[in-house]
């Protein structure tokens, strides 16, 4: 069984009874990143693949369960980054990979890529607070990850994600503006 299937099965059984999708997905993501990376010798290859598989499995489980995919993404990204820090994986890279995978996976299950992008960046920001990392660094990596994924999906997804990021009140607009326009104030 793959890591994606393992996460999907674990979350499927937990989400239906869970009141708090964010903390449930966060805990499952964190535990699975730690298990996956500790069980494999080559951390760099294993870590990005593990991040991608955990986020993919998590989103697939959430979308099937009918829970809030955006809440789930926030928890998944937060858990992935938290788990990455615990096993010595680059948290900036983990945040970017998790955000990119979230947008790709939500697109493949027919969800709102703009909302997924915002939720992924929120998860990275929350994770920075949890682990004592630089918020701007993790947020920047997550924004870049969402934009990269959206552009790979297509121009409509790219403009949806850009618009959603700019309109999200909870996100750091100085960072988003600088990334989208190339200008800093």
Image: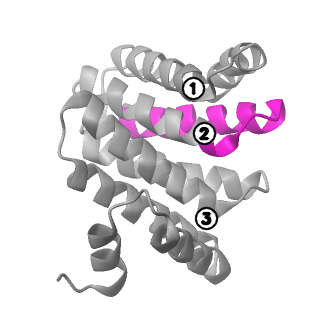
Gap in angstroms between the C-alphas marked 2 and 3? 13 Å
Residues rendered magenta in the picture: 47-70
- Residue 118 to residue 34: above or below: below
Residue drawn at (55%, 76%) of the image = 163
User: In terms of secondary structure, where does tag 2 sit?
Assistant: helix
What secondary structure is the stretch in magenta mostly built from?
helix
Based on the picture, tell me whether residue 60 belongs to the magenta stretch: yes
Where's residue 143, x and y in %? 39, 62
Quadrant of the rendering where the C terminus is positioned: bottom left
Residue at position x 22%, y 55% from top?
Answer: 136
Residue 170 percent across, percent down from the top left = 43, 56
Q: Which residue is mark 2?
A: 71
What residue would you read off at disc 3?
114
The answer to whether mark 1 and mark 2 are in CB contact below 8 A is yes
Place residue 116 in its image quadrant. Answer: bottom right
Quadrant placement of the N terminus = top right
Circle 3 residues within 10 Å: few <14, some 14–19, many ≥20: many
Label drawn at residue 25: 1
For marks 1 and 2, give the CA distance.
Answer: 9 Å
Marks 3 & 1, CB-CB < 8 Å contact: no
Sequence-wise, the earlier of marks 2 and 3 is 2
């Amino acid at each position: 069984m793959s890591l994606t299937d393992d996460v999907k099965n674990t979350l499927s059984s937990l989400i239906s009874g869970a009141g708090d999708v964010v903390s449930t997905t966060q805990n499952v993501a964190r535990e699975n990143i730690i298990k996956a990376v500790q069980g494999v010798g080559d951390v760099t290859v294993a870590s990005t693949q593990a991040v991608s598989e955990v986020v993919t499995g998590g989103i697939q489980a959430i979308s099937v369960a009918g829970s809030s995919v955006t809440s789930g993404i926030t928890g998944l990204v937060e858990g992935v980054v938290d788990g990455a820090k615990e096993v010595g994986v680059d948290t900036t890279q983990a945040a970017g990979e998790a955000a990119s995978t979230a947008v790709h996976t939500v697109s493949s299950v027919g969800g709102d890529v703009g909302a997924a992008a915002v939720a992924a960046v929120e998860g990275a920001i929350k994770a920075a607070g949890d682990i004592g990392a630089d918020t701007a660094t993790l947020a920047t990596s997550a924004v870049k990850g969402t934009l990269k994924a959206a552009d790979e999906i297509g121009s409509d997804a790219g403009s949806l994600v850009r618009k959603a990021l700019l309109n999200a009140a909870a996100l750091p607009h100085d960072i988003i503006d600088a990334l989208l326009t190339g200008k800093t104030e």
